[in-house]
Image: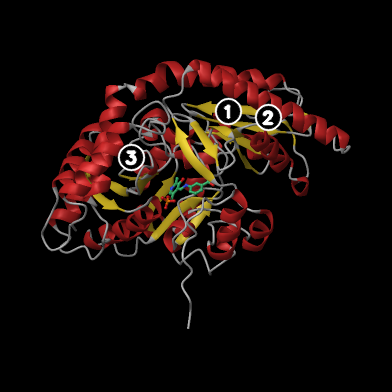
Amino acid sequence: MTTVQNHPTAPRTTADWQQADARHFLHPFTDFKGLAAKGSRIIAKADNIYLWDSEGHKILDGMSGLWCVNVGYGQQSLIDAAARQMKELPFYNAFFQTATMPAIELAEVLAEISPPQFQHVFFTGSGSEGNDTIVRMVRRYWDVVGQPERQVIIGRINGYHGSTMAGASLGGMSGMHAQGGLPIPGITHIQQPHWFELGQGQGLTRDAFGLQAAGWLEEKILEIGADKVAAFIGEPVQGAGGVIVPPATYWPEIQRICDKFGILLVSDEVICGFGRTGNWFGCETMGFKPDLMTFAKGVTSGYIPLGGVLVGDRVAQVMIDEGGEFNHGFTYSGHPTACAVALANIKLLRDLDLVSHVRDDIGPYLATRMAELDDHPLVGETQACGMMAAVQLVKEKGTEPGTGTCFASELDVGMLCRNHCFGNGLIMRAVGDRMIVAPPLVMTRAQIDEMMVLIRRCLDLTLAEVRERGWV
Ligand code: PXG
């Protein structure tokens, strides 16, 4: 018989929390044994762009939680919206010919703020479920229009589309494909438009490299046979892959190729949506017109889980007029409390004019300040787009900006730098040796200055450490 332990009534110390965590909580993307030995950092509270851990340390959250807290922490109108809705109707489903008012209203508002081809939305509980929905809907679309052999969906190496079977398959993360028999059949990948890794050293301009990278899609389509290809999916700016901002030529050329072969174009807006790039959606910043868009994260600023798919007219008309029943959906599709929080979040984004704040003021300011890091001996490239930015660490700088020689990956220099960030009160992620930030959109110029002081300090500390170890 198992005995149920009562939760202790005395306040727990950090060590108590860490022990309970290690005993029972399996964290995502984590070496369980390694973390249990080390102990988690326990985050206790947050306000605006700052977090506090269980030891009372204040931390500047350069990652908006996990690319999601776009309006910053502590926004009372989101909290009130959740409380109000929970009191009125915490949950009801959208199956069996029923609907709730917040879900209807949110569908209406999403149609309003998204590009004009989007008038319909399918709700899910997360971005991964959104991308599972994409796979099923895209394949269903081609069935209904009488081309069922169009099954293959093309994604990109180092793209990230979630962690479910379909999401992880669409993504191009080799570590994920190595576990659980992925990708599932009918999903394949092309190389990413990553200048620093694949573009430099070829004697191409960035724009020429953008065309070359888009051309890999056409090559892949011809290799598979255009009549077998259903869709192409990509993030406007790759997020989890390391904030890889493609050359300006890339997305318009991808659009041209998809149009040429009649292939559906899917924009995964889970990170780029809701103002992150300086427009409501990343496809607007990158200049393309997708047929479908996945969203999650910023739709509620992460205050409560919600995701979905915006379905463009081309697909929606077929699914509505000729599709019959679409056998797909989740308990939480259109969750009223989540939708009420999303409505409050979008109202706040509008009231504070945060999308133009990012486009016209704080985004360009972040880009300018990040570019100043190009003079640092460890920095080979900086990139920024709206409120996301990357700093590529290098062993040796190249002769031109955007070039350089990488450290051996087993040295894990990015992790050294990330540890200095943690130690200095800054959340900045490392993707290999690419340091990335995606701070809340409510950030002020003074707060960006504060973040830049921390970033430069951490780069200096990392440089001192790699010198000491004789790695440069
Ligand atoms: N698409 C994109 C573009 C994402 O960034 C998902 C789909 C999946 O969403 P859900 O809600 O199912 O997690 C994501 C999620 C990281 C990291 O390490 C990024 C994400 C999730 C977890 C970690 O940068 N993005």
- Relative placement, left or right, of 293 versus 107 is right
Q: Which residue is mark 1?
A: 383
Viewer-closest of 383 and 469: 469
Q: Quadrant of residue 195?
A: top right
Q: Which residue is mark 3?
A: 299
At horizontal 20% and vertical 45% (from top left) the residue drawn is 85
| Amino acid type at image mark 3 | Val
| Amino acid type at image mark 1 | Gln
- Relative placement, left or right, of 72 versus 116 is right
At horizontal 36% and vertical 56% (from top left) the residue drawn is 129
| Amino acid type at image mark 2 | Gly
Q: Earlier in the sequence, mark 1 or mark 3?
A: 3
Could you give the CA–CA distance between mark 1 and mark 2, rounded to whole angstroms?
Answer: 20 Å
Residue 163 seen in render: yes
Q: Position of residue 395 (x, y in %)?
A: 79, 34
Viewer-closest of 274 and 178: 274
Q: Which residue is mark 2?
A: 203
Does any atom of ligand 1 lie closer than 8 Å to the CB of label 2? no
**Is residue 20 depicted above or below 373 in this figure?**
below
Mark 3 residue element: helix
Q: Are marks 1 and 3 in contact (CB under 8 Å)?
A: no
Furthest residue to the left? 97
Mark 1 residue element: strand
Q: Quadrant of residue 300?
A: top left
Q: Position of residue 189 (x, y in %)?
A: 51, 54
